[in-house]
Image (cartoon, rainbow, N blue to C red):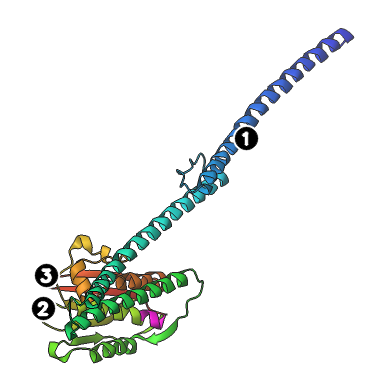
């Protein structure tokens, strides 16, 4: 190759090199701009969303552009916002329900006491019994709220004290406690069908659940026949049911009865002292602290509340 051809070759090579450099720079700049934009855009959206949250407004969910690390961060952030909204709504509902529930007995007490003060009515045994019933219902409601707060607190703890317990002993103890307080004139009995088994449970919690279910069966007893308590092994779980003669609970209401302050018949519940918290507490104990299940089944003349608890191996 002579000098002239060598010079032409070098010139052509240099031109191709410049073309390659310029093309690479353009392509690199475009890719850099595109990738930075894809990275910065969701981060900017997160910043704007957190600013709204800081001002006390719940923002709309941030759009997820890609299922990478940034996308997973956005997804977790959206879940956090949703949980905060749920907690806020539950807090508002709790305050509303609580004020509604407390207002009625307080109004009754104030009305009776004002009438006594003004001399409009005279004190008698029936009146004082009514006043005592209203004050007892208030005390029971406050006590159950404290229990609910305690179980909610325990939900945040990594360890809940549990012990191995023969369930038949616990069930018999619960029944004996209720039978001692019965009015013998009402002629009610509890029929037991209990299979022996050892469970790893929070003893006081399960006693509270059984007590709540027995109390419901007694409070809403309507009909004839015994209240039946069954305990038996069912696969890997232990099944406990309490069946009492009663007006059947409609299917569309069955899941709602486990909600806080929910009651099927407000007037009847107020008359019998129900606060609408017992089943909510029971659900909290069984499902969140024992990984069990709780539910209800009905027939034409009875209601059956049941729970299932895991059997220890």
Q: Quadrant of residue 226?
A: bottom left
Question: Looking at the image, which is closer to me, 261 or 69?
Answer: 261
Residue 311: x, y in percent? Answer: 38, 78
Q: Is residue 271 left or right of residue 234?
A: left
Would you place residue 297 above or below residue 77 in this image? below
- The residue tagged with tag 3: helix, strand or loop? loop
Residue at numbered disc 1: 36
Q: Is residue 122 left or right of residue 79?
A: left
Circles 1 and 3 in contact, beta carbons < 8 Å? no
Would you place residue 38 above or below residue 67 in this image? above
Residue 79: x, y in percent? Answer: 47, 51
On residue 162, which mark appears?
none
Residue at numbered disc 3: 300
Residue 135 belongs to the span the image colors magenta:
no
Could you tell me which quadrant the N terminus lies in?
top right
- The residue tagged with tag 2: helix, strand or loop? loop
Task: Count the labels in the image.
Answer: 3
CA gap, disc 3 and disc 2: 11 Å
Could you tell me which quadrant the C terminus lies in?
bottom left
């Amino acid at each position: 190759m002579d000098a002239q051809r060598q010079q032409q070759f070098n010139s052509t090579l240099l031109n191709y090199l410049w073309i390659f450099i310029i093309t690479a720079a353009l392509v690199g700049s475009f890719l850099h701009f595109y990738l930075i934009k894809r990275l910065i855009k969701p981060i900017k959206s997160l910043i704007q969303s957190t600013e709204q949250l800081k001002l006390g407004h719940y923002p709309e969910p941030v759009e997820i552009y890609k299922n990478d690390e940034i996308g997973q961060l956005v997804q977790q952030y959206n879940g956090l916002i949703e949980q905060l909204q749920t907690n806020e709504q539950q807090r508002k509902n709790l305050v509303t329900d609580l004020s509604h529930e407390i207002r009625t007995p307080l109004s009754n007490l104030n009305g009776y006491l004002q009438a006594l003060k003004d001399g409009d009515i005279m004190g008698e045994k029936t009146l004082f019994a009514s006043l005592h019933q209203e004050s007892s219902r208030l005390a029971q409601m406050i006590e159950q709220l404290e229990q609910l707060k305690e179980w909610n607190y325990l939900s945040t703890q990594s360890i809940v004290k549990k012990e191995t317990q023969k369930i038949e002993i616990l069930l018999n103890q619960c029944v004996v406690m209720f039978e001692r307080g019965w009015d013998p004139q009402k002629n009610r009995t509890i029929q037991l069908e209990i299979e022996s088994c050892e469970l790893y449970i929070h003893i006081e919690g399960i006693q509270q659940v059984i007590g709540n279910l027995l109390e419901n069966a007694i409070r809403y007893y309507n009909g004839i026949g015994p209240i039946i308590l069954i305990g038996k092994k069912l696969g890997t779980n232990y099944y406990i049911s309490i069946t009492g003669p009663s007006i059947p609970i409609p299917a569309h209401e069955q899941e709602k009865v486990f909600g806080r302050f929910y009651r099927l018949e407000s007037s009847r519940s107020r008359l019998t002292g129900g606060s609408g918290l017992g089943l909510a507490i029971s659900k909290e104990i069984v499902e969140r602290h024992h990984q069990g299940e709780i539910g209800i089944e009905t027939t034409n003349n009875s209601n059956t509340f049941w729970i299932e608890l895991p059997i220890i191996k």
